[in-house]
Image: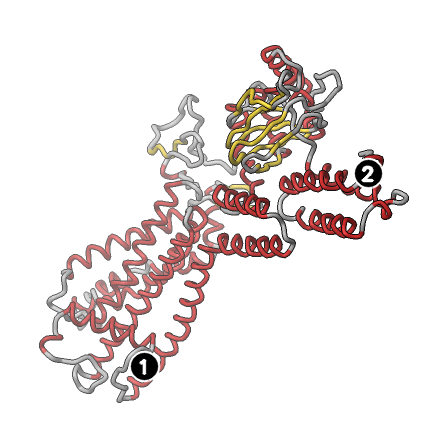
């Protein structure tokens, strides 16, 4: 095939031809593939490719730091690094640069979402990109050319020292885009992108200061050390390499930031260089301030949005004179939601659920993979506050619940005393409400037990409509679910929707629509306004307004508020109108 590495073979298949040279493990869980050197193809998303980019980035940073440093302080005899060490490091970096050209030409690429691995196409793709020209220019062996030229008679005046001059290595700086690509790839994979961006910003800022400081010392040597107050002094205490570098970096920082008083320039070249430094400082620190502000804002963006939302909620609750206990309940719920999710879209978390459905929710453990994928897309997360009822006795069951986090208790009225008592506690991985969804309770579909949250609970809701639409394509899975439900009914030895199978309430959206319809019908009743005093009528109108606005805060909180409002309306209206 044209789009496969010709040297690859499937694990376990008989090997043909010469022995394999290299065993390379491909990323993302793909089996090991075997390659010959001449047919090697690099996965752009593999770990090996990423680590190679990191090595190239180290070589790029080395050249951007060392080349200008050696040009400026070339004559320093007390340098902590010997010239031989620098030459050795230069050779290593050149080998990395040269190898990178070969590797990039053999790196697969995406074309219309398809990973192209054919070597002829990867080479053609690499050569068509602008970075290919820069990569080739960055490996031009200028030093070698000068060394060969020095042996020819017309150029015999070139000394060996000039042959190894660091000025000849300025072409190596053209490899800079490779460093940017590495940072971009790291940004897309890291869990802390703000820290990476802060490091990248600091690195670029230090490189600017480093280069301007080195150029300052070069100009000082050209003008003459100590020739005026602007250039570097020529005093004995300032004559060491470390002292020179530190003072040059200090001058560069002070000039870029325009902080403090420095001697003014004297000659034309000093004026030009100082003016250009000021101009660079304006752009650099404008970018620095903007980027630092963005990094800090991104670090606290979610928290700031949460605080702004909480301030709006607090103002609204105070303006509407909502009871204090309800205010505290809303605030506790908001704080818990922030602590658990950090304002992340909960729907994105559902992508992690198929394994959990298979391993923790027993009712789905034998279902097909396709059904699990469909159910995951239909699950709706919800959070319940401490002491909040998830469902009540006598309600119609239209949903089943899966406990994702927290605990809930099953409450059932004592037939003797009539008091509600706890009969069971459910933990993460347990579920309830499946019997009504599968219509195994003789069509009654009624809740016969209360389910209440113990602390904060995070549940995943699945409606009957969504379950039935998914089961239409999987009849065998429907039989499995019904068998699980029947076994559970026999184990509990109670009515199908009691205790451990207590059913959840109807969806909150249905509850809100029904409540609005009820209020509308009551308002249309003849003589309704005559039955209420002016104060009661105003109070009812106010409660309706609160209900309308509270629905934007949280669905489950609105359900509880509706319950309280319905009770209050019941006390205001005569029993003849309480047909609902």
Distance of label 1 from label 2 (alpha carbons): 89 Å
| Vertical comparison of 517 with 224: above or below | above
Residue under the point 38% across and 75% down: 280
Are there few (<14), some (14-19), or many (20+) residues within 10 Å of tag 2?
few
Label disc, if present, on residue 359 of the rendered structure: none
| Residue 553: percent from left, percent from top | 62, 48
The answer to whether residue 366 is seen in the rendering is yes
Residue under label 2: 574
- If you read the primary sequence from the N terminus, does the residue marked by circle 1 or circle 2 appear first? 1
CB-based contact (under 8 Å), mark 1 and mark 2: no
Can you name the residue that lies furthest to the left here?
236
| Vertical comparison of 233 with 322: above or below | below
Residue under the point 58% across and 40% down: 347
Residue under the point 50% across and 56% down: 304
Q: Secondary structure at mark 2?
A: loop
Foreground: 351 or 156? 351
Q: Is residue 33 left or right of residue 227?
A: right
Where the C terminus falls, by quadrant?
top right
Q: Secondary structure at mark 1?
A: helix
Foreground: 232 or 64? 232
| Residue 395: percent from left, percent from top | 71, 28
Q: Is residue 457 left or right of residue 56?
A: right
Write down the quadrant of residue 205 in the picture.
bottom left
| Residue 237: percent from left, percent from top | 10, 75
How many numbered tags mark residues here?
A: 2
Residue under label 1: 274
């Amino acid at each position: 095939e044209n789009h496969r590495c010709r040297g690859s073979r499937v694990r376990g298949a008989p090997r043909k031809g010469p022995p394999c040279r290299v065993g390379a493990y491909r990323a993302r869980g793909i089996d090991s593939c075997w390659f010959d050197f001449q047919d090697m193809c690099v996965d752009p998303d593999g770990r090996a490719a990423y680590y190679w980019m990191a090595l190239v980035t180290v070589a790029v940073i080395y050249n951007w730091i060392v080349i200008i440093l050696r040009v400026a302080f070339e004559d320093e005899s007390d340098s902590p690094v010997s010239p031989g060490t620098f030459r050795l490091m230069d050779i290593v970096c050149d080998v990395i640069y040269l190898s990178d050209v070969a590797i990039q030409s053999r790196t697969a690429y995406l074309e219309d979402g398809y990973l192209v691995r054919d070597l002829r196409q990867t080479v053609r793709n690499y050569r068509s990109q602008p970075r290919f020209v820069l990569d080739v220019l960055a490996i031009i062996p200028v030093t070698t050319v000068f060394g060969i030229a020095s042996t020819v008679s017309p150029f015999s005046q070139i000394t060996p020292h000039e042959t190894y001059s660091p000025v000849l290595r300025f072409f190596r700086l053209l490899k800079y885009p490779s460093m940017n690509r590495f940072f971009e790839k790291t940004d897309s994979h890291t869990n802390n992108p703000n820290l990476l961006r802060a490091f990248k910003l600091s690195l670029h800022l230090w490189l600017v200061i480093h280069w301007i400081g080195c150029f300052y010392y070069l100009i000082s040597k050209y003008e003459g050390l100590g020739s005026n107050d602007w250039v570097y002094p020529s005093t004995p205490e300032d004559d060491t390499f470390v002292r020179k570098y530190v003072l040059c970096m200090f001058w560069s920082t002070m000039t870029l930031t325009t902080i403090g008083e420095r001697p003014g320039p004297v000659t034309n070249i000093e004026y030009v260089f100082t003016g250009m430094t000021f101009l660079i400082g304006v752009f650099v620190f404008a970018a620095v301030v903007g980027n630092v502000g963005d990094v800090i804002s991104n670090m606290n963006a979610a928290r700031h949005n949460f605080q702004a939302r909480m301030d709006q909620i607090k103002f609204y609750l105070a303006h509407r004179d909502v009871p204090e206990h309800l205010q505290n309940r809303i605030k506790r719920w908001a704080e818990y939601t922030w602590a658990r999710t950090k304002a992340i879209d909960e729907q994105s978390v559902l992508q992690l659920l198929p394994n959990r459905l298979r391993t923790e929710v027993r009712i789905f453990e034998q279902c097909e993979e396709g059904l699990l994928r469909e159910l995951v897309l239909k699950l709706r997360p919800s959070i319940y506050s401490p002491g909040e009822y998830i469902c009540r006795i006598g309600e119609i069951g239209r949903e089943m619940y899966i406990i994702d986090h927290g605990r809930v208790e099953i409450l059932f009225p004592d037939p003797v005393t009539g008091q509600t008592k706890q009969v069971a506690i459910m933990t993460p991985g347990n579920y309830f409400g499946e019997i009504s969804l599968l219509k195994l309770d003789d069509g009654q579909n009624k809740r016969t037990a209360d389910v209440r949250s113990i602390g904060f609970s995070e549940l995943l809701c699945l409606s009957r409509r969504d379950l039935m639409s998914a089961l239409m394509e999987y009849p065998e899975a429907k039989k499995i679910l019904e068998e699980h439900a029947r076994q559970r009914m026999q184990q509990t030895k109670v009515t199908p929707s009691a205790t451990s199978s207590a059913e959840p309430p109807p969806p909150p959206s249905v509850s809100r629509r029904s409540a609005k319809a009820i209020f509308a019908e009551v308002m249309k009743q003849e003589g309704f306004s005559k039955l209420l005093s002016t104060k009661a009528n105003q109070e009812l109108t106010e409660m309706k307004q609160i209900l309308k606005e509270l629905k934007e805060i949280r669905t489950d909180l609105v359900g509880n508020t509706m319950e309280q409002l319905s009770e209050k309306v019941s006390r205001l209206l005569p029993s003849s109108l309480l047909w609902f």
